[in-house]
Image (cartoon, rainbow, N blue to C red):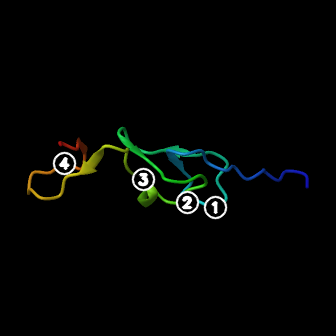
Amino acid sequence: MDGASECTRCPQGHFQAQGNATACDQCARGFTTRYLAADSVHACECEEGFYLRRDRADADGRCVACTT
């Protein structure tokens, strides 16, 4: 298979939005994926112990630490 690229299986915390891409994109700071080979930025979620605040109009899309 001359000229063909090998598929890349993205590690946890990364995703590959285009099926024919040979590189992975990293989730934003504070975000990760639950599984390997994520295929969309929508697979990125807050790391364990954090949550995405959506209860206020000024929520900025960052992960906030859970409180006990």
Q: In this figure, which residue is indicated by the disc labeled 2?
A: 39
How far apart, in angstroms, are the residues tagged by discs 4 and 2?
Answer: 24 Å
What residue is at 59 percent from the left and 44 percent from the top? 11
Of callouts 1 and 3, which one flags the residue occurring earlier in the amino acid sequence? 1
Of callouts 1 and 4, which one flags the residue occurring earlier in the amino acid sequence? 1
Q: Amino acid at mark 2?
A: Asp
Find residue 9 and report its horizontal and vertical position in percent. Answer: 67, 50
Of callouts 4 and 2, which one flags the residue occurring earlier in the amino acid sequence? 2
Q: In this figure, which residue is indicated by the disc labeled 3?
A: 44
How far apart, in angstroms, are the residues tagged by discs 2 and 3?
Answer: 10 Å
Q: In this figure, which residue is indicated by the disc labeled 4?
A: 60
Q: Is 39 left or right of 47, judged from the image as shown?
A: right
Determine crowd level at label 3: few under 14, some 14-19, many 20+ residues with C-alpha closer than 10 A.
Answer: many
Labelled pair 4, 3 in contact (Cβ < 8 Å): no
How far apart, in angstroms, are the residues tagged by discs 1 and 4?
Answer: 30 Å
Determine crowd level at label 4: few under 14, some 14-19, many 20+ residues with C-alpha closer than 10 A.
Answer: few
Closer to the camera: disc 1 or disc 3? 3
Determine crowd level at label 2: few under 14, some 14-19, many 20+ residues with C-alpha closer than 10 A.
Answer: some
Residue 23: image quadrant is: top right
Q: Secondary structure at mark 4?
A: loop
Of callouts 2 and 3, which one flags the residue occurring earlier in the amino acid sequence? 2
Find residue 64 and report its horizontal and vertical position in percent. Answer: 22, 43
Q: Amino acid at mark 4?
A: Asp
Q: Amino acid at mark 1?
A: Gly
Q: In this figure, which residue is indicated by the disc labeled 1?
A: 19
How far apart, in angstroms, are the residues tagged by discs 1 and 2?
Answer: 8 Å
Q: Is 52 left or right of 10, judged from the image as shown?
A: left
Q: Secondary structure at mark 3?
A: loop
Find residue 44 and report its horizontal and vertical position in percent. Answer: 42, 53
Closer to the camera: disc 1 or disc 4? 4
Labelled pair 1, 4 in contact (Cβ < 8 Å): no
